[in-house]
Image: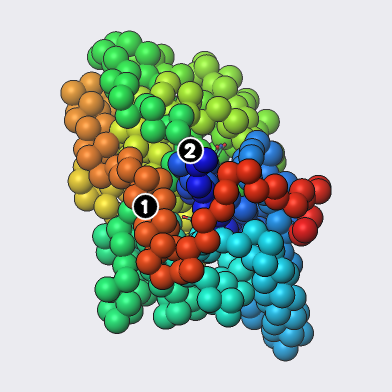
Amino acid sequence: MTLSRHYVLAAGGTGGHMIPAHALAEELIRRGHRAALVTDARGARIPGLFNGVQVHVLPAGRLGGGPIGWWRALRNIYTGRAMASRLYETFRPAAVIGFGGYPALPALMAAQRDGIPTLVHEQNAVLGRVNRLMARKVDAIATAYPDIDRLSPKHEPKVHLVGNPVREEVLELRDQPYPALSEDGVFRILVTGGSQGATILSHVVPDGLGLLPEHFRRRLQVTQQCRTEDIDRVRSVYARLGIPADLATYITDMPEKLAWAHLVIARAGASTIAELTAAGRPAILVPLPSATDDHQTANAREMAKTGGARMIAQRNFTPIELAKQMQKLGLSPAALGNAADRARLVGRPDAARDLADLLERTGQELGSDPLVAEEMVLRPVSGGAFA
Ligand SMILES: CC(=O)N[C@H]1[C@@H](OP(=O)(O)OP(=O)(O)OC[C@H]2O[C@@H](n3ccc(=O)[nH]c3=O)[C@H](O)[C@@H]2O)O[C@H](CO)[C@@H](O)[C@@H]1O
């Protein structure tokens, strides 16, 4: 009889938190464990993620927003904590891990009150708000970058660098060579603004590519994610320039598109960078300036420092600047291949494995380590609601 353990993964409902949680869940299931996801209403609606994982919705609210906002947030936290404790009574997790986002807060608080070991995973190079609140009390802090801003030195002993887990299909690209590129052959560009898209890329990229010399422009093929309000205008610019462009509000086959691309122009969200460095794709990164504590600039720094990416601050990201960078990068296949190798160098392809090891270790060393027989029948959960 195989024995397995149960783990709870708690993540706010944006792609940034959910994608690493999903990759960890896949790894845990591969190891014969069971996983439950605690998230908010948005997270439970993300299609295709978390097959084979119980999904539970906790009420979540942002902290702040005046006295009424605080009152609502605290009410949600306490209700969420009670709901999480009820889940733990039946699911009996060996450990609970938070990926940031407000639903992680009550899930971690309930675990700590119930004596269950807790961890957080920080995807960015700056510790996020919920992880900062929980840093003192959790048993382990897993990070994606070697240097994390806003992390108190007194927590260093429990910090473990693991990286950001990425989807299995992206990891498989690591074994494929960088796509062949010749001085006069097709040059394929992927443009993505993270899970919500980025209007600035729609404003600048088509115009910037339009400024390239004719002989270079004729080689281009583009796949671009655009926000709904931008897509028609972007389509007409590419049509006028004669650049073949495949546009979508959300790219559903990102691993295939990464495999296809010679160069990626993107925001600097944590999963985007983890995927670029796992697959080894050179990039031009334009960090979102309004990201909390400017974490996207911090995220982009490591890849830029090693030469795998060029970082352009949004205030300098103009069509002329983009065309300049494209010519520096794009005209030499050798330089681009070299940048791809450097991107790959900073990848942490074992992130899911290392995070799962840390979770198992923390649960076994610090918890009551409930081993659960494989035959155990779990109470069914209906419609994503809290059981
Ligand atoms: C606007 C914002 O605050 N973004 C934050 C959000 O990430 P956000 O979700 O915006 O961005 P990430 O780069 O972390 O993740 C995007 C994910 O969506 C996928 N994707 C994207 C577009 C698309 O068309 N198809 C597709 O599949 C990407 O492949 C990637 O896996 O949380 C991250 C982790 O805390 C932060 O680093 C980001 O700064």
Residue depicted at x 42% and y 80%? 136
Q: Quadrant of residue 274?
A: top left
Q: Quadrant of residue 276?
A: top left
Left or right: residue 65 versus residue 68 is left
Image coordinates for residue 46, horizontal then vertical, percent: 67, 44
Left or right: residue 171 versus residue 111 is left
Q: In the displayed structure, would residue 146 be above or below residue 343?
A: below
Q: Nearer the viewer, residue 349 or 372?
A: 372
Residue flagged by tag 2: what amino acid is it? Arg
The disc at residue 30 is: 2
Q: Nearer the viewer, residue 198 or 148?
A: 148
State whether label 1 is within 8 Å of ligand 1.
no
The disc at residue 357 is: 1
Residue depicted at x 52% and y 56%? 371
Q: Nearer the viewer, residue 322 or 193?
A: 193
> Which quadrant of the figure contains the C terminus?
bottom right
Residue depicted at x 26% and y 32%? 340
Residue depicted at x 37% and y 45%? 353
> Is residue 75 something that shows in the picture?
yes
The span from disc 1 to disc 2 (Cα, nearest Å) is: 13 Å
State whether label 2 is within 8 Å of ligand 1.
no
Q: Dot 1, how many residues are within 10 Å of its Cα: few (below 14), some (14-19), or many (20+)? A: some
Q: Dot 2, how many residues are within 10 Å of its Cα: few (below 14), some (14-19), or many (20+)? A: few
Q: Nearer the viewer, residue 197 or 272?
A: 272
> Is residue 199 something that shows in the picture?
no
Q: In the displayed structure, would residue 128 be above or below residue 47?
A: below
Residue flagged by tag 1: what amino acid is it? Asp
Quick one: SS at disc 1?
Answer: helix
Image coordinates for residue 151, horizontal then vertical, percent: 35, 74
Quick one: SS at disc 2?
Answer: helix
The disc at residue 51 is: none
